[in-house]
Image (cartoon, helix red, strand yellow):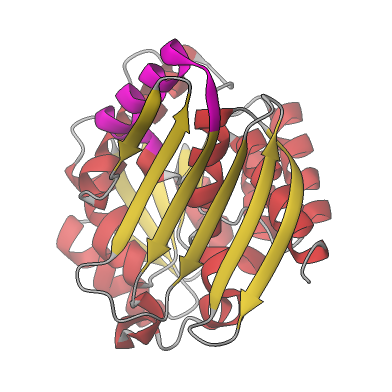
Amino acid sequence: MNDTRPRIGLVGAGPWAQRVHGPGVAAHPDTDLVSVWARRPEAAAAIAAPHGATPTTSFDDLLAAVDAVTFAVPPAVQAPLALRAVEAGKHVILEKPLAASVEEAGQLVDAAERAGVTTLMMLTFRYAPEVADWLAATHRTGGWHGGAARWLSATLLDSKYETSAWRHAGGALADIGPHTFDLLDAALGEITTVLHAHFAERGRTWHVLFGHDSGATSTATMTMHTPAEPPINDFSVFGEHGLSYLDPSGDASVRYAALLDQFVAMVRAGATEHPTDIRRGLHLQRLHHQVLAHLD
């Protein structure tokens, strides 16, 4: 596309579409928000209006008007729509989880590879410079024996998400698990084994123990039903050289802008590979499935 500004359509009208996707695409200097489609036409219109975009009642009409699509819908909705988008040659920004099943995720990856389109996952931490710097430092240092992640929040006690059925059904594992597993995997090497998984009904808390291809082990503790204020969200690795700690909390809108920087650069270059492209989404989908399979 050379230096052309990608025309982007937004699919979805929930809290993240309202707070991050819509305003982010509209404000970015190198993208145009041209169309919004959602299950509720009035919700699509409410997002489109402030940004001069066109609300549409047809997903096919949205596809006809854009070069790329950014999705902000549940995984079971995203996968079939994203499949249609990539088969139509559209570049895509995808939410996590990628799909409702490993099979669906795999089909979507295959279609994206056949189409040769640019894809990025909404693993927003990974686009923050401080997170990239921390990961680079952990790789330079090496010698890590293990790591730990904690994510304790009250997100699903918040009325903003009371109608988000997929979040309440999947809980922390589905919503914040992909972010958590992605950073542990990126820091310590590919997660190859789920050694143990436990779900505590009290506090609706997940505890997961992983094995990595580096020989390291790591733990993840996650809940979205704890009234922690401020929320606790931290990562650490330990080993031969001591302890390295990361607090990745930050502004999701700023990180989405950084994602768009990289997305636009990839689209213009015709690039299809990135550490957080659609293949990463499939890897994380498989980990999600493996955690469920190892529940005690």
In the rendered image, the quadrant that contains the C terminus is: bottom right
| 151 lies left or right of 199 | left
Quarter of the image where the N terminus is located:
top left
Towards the viewer: 75 or 31: 75
Q: Residue at x 58, y 22 (%)?
A: 272
Residue shown at 31% from the left, 82% from the top? 160
Q: Is residue 195 above or below residue 75?
A: above
Query: Image height check: is 4 above or below 58?
Result: above
State the image coordinates of residue 11 (x, y, percent, origin top left). Answer: 46, 60
> Looking at this view, is 81 or 162 the one in front?
162
Q: Is residue 123 left or right of residue 99?
A: left
What's the residue at 73%, 58% (across, down)?
196
* Nearer-the-camera pick, 283 or 186: 186
Q: Which residues are magenta?
A: 126-145
* Rendered location of residue 137, percent (x, y): 36, 18
User: Does the segment drawn in magenta span residue 5?
Assistant: no
Above or below for 46 versus 260: below
Q: What is the x, y in percent for residue 49?
A: 21, 66
Can residue 237 be seen at all in this image of the molecule?
yes
Q: How many marks?
A: 0
Viewer can see residue 92: no
Q: In the displayed structure, would residue 249 be above or below residue 28?
A: below
Q: Quadrant of residue 18?
A: bottom left
Counting from the top left corner in percent of width and height, residue 115 is at 70, 29
Magenta highlight: main SS = helix
**Quarter assignment of residue 171:** bottom right
